[in-house]
Image (cartoon, helix red, strand yellow):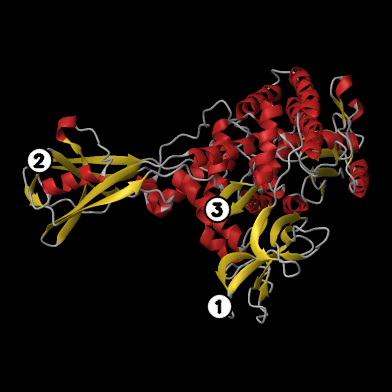
Amino acid sequence: MSQKLVIVESPAKMKTIKKFLGSGYDVAASVGHVRDLPKSTMGVDVENDFEPRYITIRGKGDVIADLKKLSKKADVIYLATDPDREGEAISWHLKAALGLDGEENAKNVKRITFNEITEKAVKDAIKKPRDINMDLVDAQQARRVMDRVVGYSISPILWDKIKKGLSAGRVQSATLNIICRREEEIAAFVPEEYWTIDASMKNKAKEAKASYYGEASDGGKKTVVRTEADAQRIVDDVRGQEMTVTEVKKTERVKNPPYPYTTSTMQQDASRLLGLSTFNTMRVAQRLYEGVKVNGYGTIGLITYLRTDSIRISDDAAASAAAFIKDKYGSSYVSKRGTGSKAGANVQDAHEAIRPTHIEITPESVKDQLDRDEFRLYRLVWNRFVASRMTPAVYDVTGVKLEKAGHVFAANGSSVKFDGYLAVYKSGDEEEEKQDLSFLSEGMKIIFSKIEKQQHFTEPPAHYTESSLVKEMEELGIGRPSTYAPTITTLLARHYIAKEKKSLFVTELGQAVNDLMRKSFHDVADPKFTALMEEDLDKVACGELDWKKVLRDYYPGLQRELEEAKTGLEKVKVADQVSDVICDKCGRNMVIKYGPHGKFLACPGFPECRNTKPLLEKTGDKCPECGADVIKRRSKKGRTFYTCENEKCEWISWNRPGKKGRTGEK
């Protein structure tokens, strides 16, 4: 009996797939990449047309040895790494590492991909093997080599001019620049005064609110009231006076359902609605994709592939959704929307949107089989997909205009006429105004029961959150679905940015790095350049551009900038952030430092005074045992845990109060 070998990336995926295939298959895991550029050197021969030097990753010797043994016993080897450029490259590296890249092995080594880890998807993939797509491999090589050349060339400049241990990167530097620009906009913002005027009107038991809209002489344009004197004049003109209802306009408004999730939109909503970081979102999504135990199904992937920029879905998925929606909600809820892909120059459309693999597995049916974050993210994905295949919501909208002394006030009300997709999914930005305006009719006279003015000032642009930053990165074409989370994680880990609650702030170190990058390496810091580079990588993936030409065109300019930076830049001193904690040994204000396990307090008098203290980061939670503040700490291995601020209280947990973890340990 012939034996077949399927090689995947992760052990979790391996266990899931093993259950789908019979005894004629061995399933093994490469545990990610097996070859890469060396860490100790650039690993790219710039003089020899940017030829990369790949080596076996440290610690992967045993993995490769085991895979070689299995491959020698196998008649056919299926390389089933992830269905993207990175996965294609891993398959290519596996062929080389296992000695399977010769012509004599061509018939025996096959590439297969699947968008979901279900029995049908895996078996269908095995029926449709193909060769490794070298265009996709070359696109990955171009990205890897470009990023290595940029990083390993510029980082030593940062070490010399600012401090050791810093790094520069193509997507990383452009993203840092975006955040710094927002900080500059906030700092330069000059608030402008404006006033609003709100009024109440009653008719027996009914009450509604109206707001100043503008002047009748302005032809229906909305007017901004800039001074208190103008606001008071309007209030005086209409207070106690009969307002005439000049217009009652009734319309229907249709709100279309959202599209199913892409990586970007999933990360945005998980941050905004669930409070998950982009890193944690992808980590949880990976578990849902690779497989979890589900009663009646065994171990199964609950969602499709998590790295995608497409909103396309398969015809089978659309048909399953239509049947489910018709059965649960009725035929009037079933959408006629197509399954087409998302338009846009930066969209690769290599995979389907993120959706549940089995629509009949509802979130509530598996709630007790998932941990807290798995359940919340699966519910988000499931609800969004089901909603995307439902009909629009329909609102009854009423708009009323009232006038007196040339001043126009407006009142609006809306109510859901048909809920459509809202029966399943609400994003939190629904605009329903429930006030009842049915007691108002054209020509009616009514006196405001209350009218008041209020001063406001325009607000500066908001600090980026992880959600809004991912949205901006996607809109600017910076990075790709697989790079959003790692880029933000790296910026936080390097302490170029800091996160307070949900907002991202540039640190002094980050500002110094960005200033240097803007001055000496404008292209690398420029989001437009990075977006154009992504377009070139897409052309490589489509076979339209030689991957080394991308490097040949870029490198001479980088080389000139490097030479100028080495001699033309002065050293930059970055001041430590001063805290309000007093050193109990010498009386100085301690400063915040960064170590391998996060922030800590140190005396600025080093080396005379070597006093250090842990920096206590309050979470905003209360201790479940004594009610004091909860403090976030890090173990020596870098793992986050929580303790009580009260030293006499012994409460300690791996999880924040009220948040159930996978283990529930305490």
Quadrant into which the C terminus falls: bottom right
Q: Mark 2 points at which residue?
A: 405
* Residue 114, visible in the rendered structure: no
| Residue nearest the viewer, comparing 246 with 568 | 568
Q: Hey, what amino acid is under mark 3?
A: Lys
- Label 2 element class: loop
* Residue 266, visible in the rendered structure: yes
Residue 241 location (% of width, % of height): 7, 49
Q: Hey, what amino acid is under mark 1?
A: Gly
Q: Is residue 304 depicted above or below 636 in this figure? A: above
Location of residue 531 (image quadrant): top right
- Label 3 element class: loop
Residue 627, numbered circle: 1
Spatial distance from mark 2 to mark 1, Cα to Cα?
A: 58 Å
- Tell me whether the residue at label 2 lies in contact with that at label 3, contact meaning CB atoms closer than 8 angstroms: no
Few, some or many residues within 10 Å of mark 1 (<14, 14–19, 20+): few
Residue 502, numbered circle: 3
Quadrant into which the N terminus falls: top right
Spatial distance from mark 3 to mark 1, Cα to Cα?
A: 24 Å
- Label 1 element class: loop
Q: Is residue 309 depicted above or below 632 in this figure? A: above
558 vs 255, left or right, is right
Q: Is residue 131 depicted above or below 455 in this figure? A: above
Residue 642, numbered circle: none
**Mark 2 vs 1, N-terminal side:** 2
Spatial distance from mark 2 to mark 3, Cα to Cα?
A: 47 Å
Residue at 57% from the left image edge and 41% from the top image edge: 470
Location of residue 565 (image quadrant): top right
Q: Nearer the viewer, mark 2 or mark 3?
A: 2
Residue at 91% from the left image edge and 48% from the top image edge: 66
| Residue nearest the viewer, comparing 156 with 28 | 156
